Image: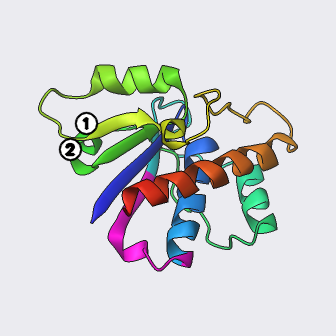
Amino acid sequence: MKSILFVCFGNLCRSPATEIVFKHKLKERGLSEKFIVSSAGVSDQHTGQTTDFRVMQEAQKRGITDTHDNPARKITLDDYYNYDLILAMEMEQLLELQKEKPADAKCEIDLLLSYVDTPGDCNILDPYYETESNFPELFDILDDALEFLIIKLTK
């Protein structure tokens, strides 16, 4: 079983959206039992808050009915030991994760978009301070990136 943690800044938009979409894709392929999937943030600024309602609206529009009921949380030291792969949404978070990773932790840390075969920006921009119109773009990016991730992880 492979364990994956998706990480953004506050665990309100990008990482919960990624978790939801990834779990949905795994479920469609009958792979849910092969993965442990969760999300966190590098900041504790939003700890305890619920996932941004715009994430859930966009998920529902795309036929994703599973909800994200976990409150926002900050990544912990245990996460570095409990997950095989920790994927950041942008370079700033990647650097923070690499800096905080204990020397004896075996997890791999990378950018989610490093799994995409097409060149482009390595950062998934944060739609939190934007309008609802930015959430479809977020889900489009996640849809493509997670297809590549599943292919690479199930080879």
Quarter occupied by the N terminus: bottom left
At 72% across and 59% down in the image, what residue appears?
A: 56
Q: Is residue 134 left or right of residue 103?
A: right
Q: Amino acid at mark 2?
A: Tyr
Quadrant location of residue 110?
top left
Mark number, residue 81: 2
Image coords of residue 129 (percent x, y)? 77, 30
At 49% across and 36% down in the image, what residue appears?
A: 114
Instruction: Kindly state the secondary structure of the residue where label 1 is placed.
Output: helix
Instruction: Kindly state the secondary structure of the residue where label 2 is placed.
Output: helix
Quarter occupied by the C terminus: bottom left
Name the foreground residue: 16 vs 154: 154
Q: Is residue 120 visible?
A: yes
The local crowd at label 2, few if under 14, some if 14 to 19, many if 20 or more residues have their Cα within 10 Å, is some
Q: Amino acid at mark 1?
A: Leu
Quadrant location of residue 69?
bottom right
Image coords of residue 100 (percent x, y)? 29, 24
Residue at image mark 1: 77
The local crowd at label 1, few if under 14, some if 14 to 19, many if 20 or more residues have their Cα within 10 Å, is few
Mark number, residue 4: none
Q: Are marks 2 and 1 in contact (CB under 8 Å)?
A: yes
Compared with 3, 94 (above or below) is above
Q: Residue furthest left?
A: 104
At 40% across and 48% down in the image, what residue appears?
A: 5
Name the foreground residue: 65 vs 25: 25
In magenta segment, residue 19: no
Magenta span covers which residues? 28-38
